[in-house]
Image: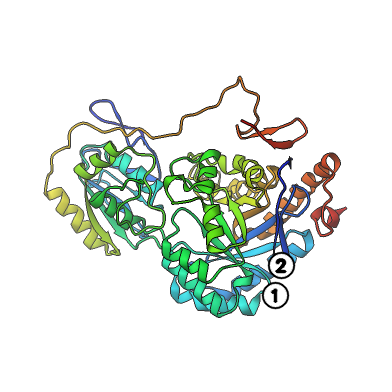
Amino acid sequence: MFSFTKEQKTLEISGVKIGGQPGMYPTVLFGGLFFKGEPDFENAKKHIQNMLSLSKKTGNPGIPDFFIRREEHLESIIDFIEENLPTGYPFSIDIIEPSLKIIALETLHKRKLLHRTIYNSIHIGVTDEEREALQKHTPEMAILVAFNPKDKSSDGKIEVLSNGANLLDKGLIDISKEVGVKKTLVDTAALAPGENSGASIAAIPVVKEEYGLPTGCAIHNVVEKSTWLNEFKTARKTVDVSSNINIPLYGGDFAIYGPIENTDLVFPVIAWQDILVSEYTENYFGVSPVDYHPRRKFF
Amino acid sequence: MDIMNDNNVEYYPWGGEFTVCSPTSCVAVVLLNIDYTPSCDKVAIYGHLKTENIGVEKIVANVISNPYIRFLIICGDEIRGHKSGGSLVALNKNGIDKNNRIRDAPGAIPYIENLNREAIERFRSQIETIDLIGIKNVDKINKTIDECIEKKPSSFGKPYIAVRITPEAVASFKDKRALHSKIIIDYMGKVKKRKG
């Protein structure tokens, strides 16, 4: 439970605030819609409604993270976003393939949705074409993934953000500025067990003190990649969900918590952790939680 | 998983999600998006590949530890976005550039950062990749395995145990930093940037 000397930026997208000193804003929770095969929009709708309902109850903002694998699904997913998310509500798009990222940016521009878009993500694989597309069709917010294949420690993550670690001509922070993204979040790149997975948590306060940017990670990825946990089938879900408490505990601002199906468990667990953090940070550092913080809801 | 060879060297030292079969077989099979189990009597090792960087590194390090392996069959639908299968083929064909990027790799982040160049050259010399990316027909894959075995290639010689390149650890119990050298955290939890 920390307080930072560096001024902490608070960013806003469509009314959702993220960042600041620990204990001020509730942890923002990104739930993934992975759509394996043909998208099941009925199911997605049900899960998003549930996320919004739990968000209202706990105070933790919930952002649906749309994982888009195929170009042929792009339009229908965007239709779904327009028709089913509350008016003006933010969402993130998570696409691996650089060429599909470019098409998605063009489509979101045409559909006038870029002001609600969190672009997930800019990383060392960013291509020149992707940079041009980002400059032309700039999303409101982007996540910078501090993955450094050479050095998975906090230092390696800082290196990628600050100078590109010899893998890029400049750091991810400068690239995001160059293309015109004004609001950036830092994802500390949680890797598989055995790949310095703990560094994604330890790097949170380091990144926040270095840049003052909202920081978090997808610690769920570590659990997902564990084969060791196969021996503890009943505990797997508990481990997955509870891993996320490390993020607010280390001063982080957001958790990308994996499948949206985990919403029922993740929201109360993180809300509870936010309460613990807030009780300490208000008492010792004088950081008052905002009026919709979980601590205001429960006490 | 610990398979020792004649020289008492442990094969497949980098670990991962794979199944170890016949240690003297000349074939290893990389599974992309495919539900298929190769015959353990015929292949040395098989397993799934997910990522175009760390995943590829593990495969390279593991297959070169067993000199009997001379063919690497890559089958199943390509991993979307990552294009890990194509990146593995490109590594074998083209090697890496000065920034450690696999030359002409189709993947999003195809960087080899934990293996030295000698290990990569060993991989390129020892192993012939058989590109069955996009193929899920089991008969076709089995036939390809048989064709490789029929070639009866000789062992490549001694096992090559790749050393994982890791940044030098700088931890010391003599200093009083908490968590990381860039920051100081006092007993209350106040974080400050460390000067100097």
* Spot occupied by residue A112 in the image (x, y as percentages of width and height): 59, 78
Q: Which mark is residue A52?
A: 2
Instruction: Answer above or below: position of A112 versus A243.
Output: below
Instruction: Indicate the quadrant where residue A261 lies.
Output: bottom right
| Mark 1 touches mark 2? (CB < 8 Å) | yes
Q: Which mark is residue A86?
A: 1
Instruction: Indicate the quadrant where residue B13 lies.
Output: top left
Instruction: Answer above or below: position of A85 versus A7.
Output: below
User: Is disc 1 surrounded by few (<14), some (14 to 19) or many (20+) residues within 10 Å?
Assistant: few
Asked if residue A89 can be seen in this view, the reply is yes
Instruction: Answer above or below: position of B28 versus B80.
Output: above
User: Residue at position x 34%, y 59% from top?
Assistant: B106
Q: Secondary structure at mark 1?
A: loop
User: Is disc 2 surrounded by few (<14), some (14 to 19) or many (20+) residues within 10 Å?
Assistant: many
Give the spatial CA distance, label 1 vs label 2: 9 Å
Q: Which mark is residue A230?
A: none
Amino acid type at image mark 2: Leu
Give the residue furthest to the top. Answer: B174
Chain ID, mark 2: A
Which one is in front, A87 or A179?
A179
